[in-house]
Image (spheres, rainbow, N blue to C red):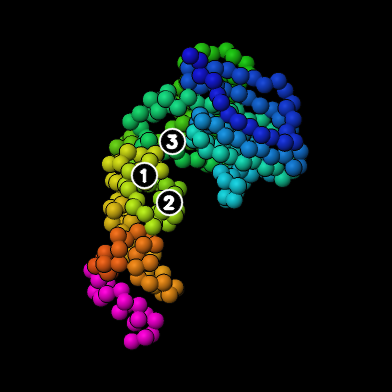
Amino acid sequence: MAFRPRMQAQTRAYRTLRPLCVRTWPGVVADVWHVESGADAGGFYLSPDPRLVVLLGTPPQSLSLKTSESGDITTPVSMVYVPAGQPLWSAMGAGERFSHLDLHLEAGPLQQRLAGLIPPGKLCETVMLSGDPDAPVARTLARMVADEVERPSRPTMMLDGLLSAMLAEVLNLSSEGAEHSGGLSPRQIAAVKRHVANAIPRRISVAELAQLCGLSESWFSRAFARSTGETPQRWIARHRLEAAMELMLTTDRGLAEIADATGFADQAHLTRIFRASQGLPPSQWRRMRNGQD
C-alpha cells in the first residue's frame, strides 16, 4: 500500500502563489509550496508521521515556531525536523513571500534507513535550525530535492540518496554510529524531570521514563547514567528525598503526609531513607532547620 501522509493542518492568512508540486517514492511524499502570508498568518499542524520541512531561499524573518501553546518560540527558522505526533504552531509577524519543501516520512522505512546510525529516541526529538550557518549542506541538498520535485529529470534513487544525506546533516549523525552515542539530549532530560516532578507521589518505573524518551529500558538506563552520573533509580530516590525535605521546610504537614505526597511507602520508610542520607531522623532535622533546637 502506498504511503499517504495524514497531517492535520489548520492555517489562516496564507495564500498559495503556484500550484502545489508533489513527488513520491517509497516511504516519502515530497511537496513544494510557494506561499504569501498575511501579517497575522499562522497555523497548527499535527501528524502521526515524521516530517522534515525546509525553507527554501531566504527564510522568512518573521516566521516563528513552537512545539506547545505556552512553549518557547524559535525564530527565525530555516529547517525543522518534526517527529511523529509532535504538534507544531507557526506564526508570522509580517506579510512575506517564501517557499518551503515538506518531506513526509513513513516511520517504519525511516527507522530502517537509520538503523544502527542513531539511538531510537533521537527520532522523537524536534530539531529546529535557524539559518544557513546551522546546516548549509542540508539546505543545499533540500534545494536539489525541490528542483527535482518541480522539474523531474532524475530517478527517485537520487532523491532517496539526497534525503539520507539531509537526515544525516539535520540529525547530526556521526560516523561512529549509535552504539557510541552519548547520553540523553537536554530535551529528554527536561522531559524526565517534568515527568518525575508530576509523578513523585507514586511509584515511577524506569520503563515509563524510557518510553517517554523513545528508548529501550536498557539503552535509557545507560544514557541516563552518562548524562547524570546516577542510575535512574538512585536519581528518582534522591529527588523524592529532596521533595520531602522541601515540604518539611515550607509546610507544617506531618511526616506521614509528606511521605505519602513524595512517594515513600510510609513514614517509617521516609525516616529510614532520611537517616541514611542525613545522619539524623527527619523530625530532628526539621526542628534544627526551623531553629527550634
* Mark 1 element type: helix
Q: Position of residue 71 (x, y in %)?
A: 57, 50
Along the viewing direction, whichever of 67 and 129 lies nearer the viewer: 67
Kind of residue sitting beneath label 3 = Leu
Along the viewing direction, whichever of 226 and 97 lies nearer the viewer: 226
Left or right: residue 290 versus residue 81 is left
Asked whether 222 falls inside the magenta stretch, the response is: no
Q: Position of residue 108 (x, y in %)?
A: 42, 25
Q: Which residues are magenta?
A: 275-293
Along the viewing direction, whichever of 168 and 26 lies nearer the viewer: 26
**Distance CA(mark 2)–CA(mark 3):** 20 Å
Mark 2 crowd level (few <14, some 14–19, many ≥20, 10 Å Cα): some
Task: Give the label, 2 or 3, closer to the camera.
Answer: 2
Residue picked out by circle 1? 208
**Quadrant showing the C terminus:** bottom left
User: Residue at coordinates 69% horizontally, 35% vertically from top-left?
Assistant: 11
User: Residue at coordinates 34% horizontally, 52% vertically from top-left?
Assistant: 203
- Looking at the rendered structure, which numbered label has been put on residue 195? 2
Q: Is residue 134 above or below residue 201?
A: above
Closer to the chain start, of discs 1 and 3, is 3
Residue picked out by circle 3? 123
Kind of residue sitting beneath label 2 = His
Kind of residue sitting beneath label 1 = Glu
Image quadrant of residue 112? top left
* Mark 2 element type: helix
Do tag 1 and tag 2 residues touch (Cβ < 8 Å)? yes
Closer to the chain start, of discs 1 and 2, is 2
Residue 182 shows up from this direction: no
**Distance CA(mark 1)–CA(mark 2):** 10 Å
Mark 3 crowd level (few <14, some 14–19, many ≥20, 10 Å Cα): many
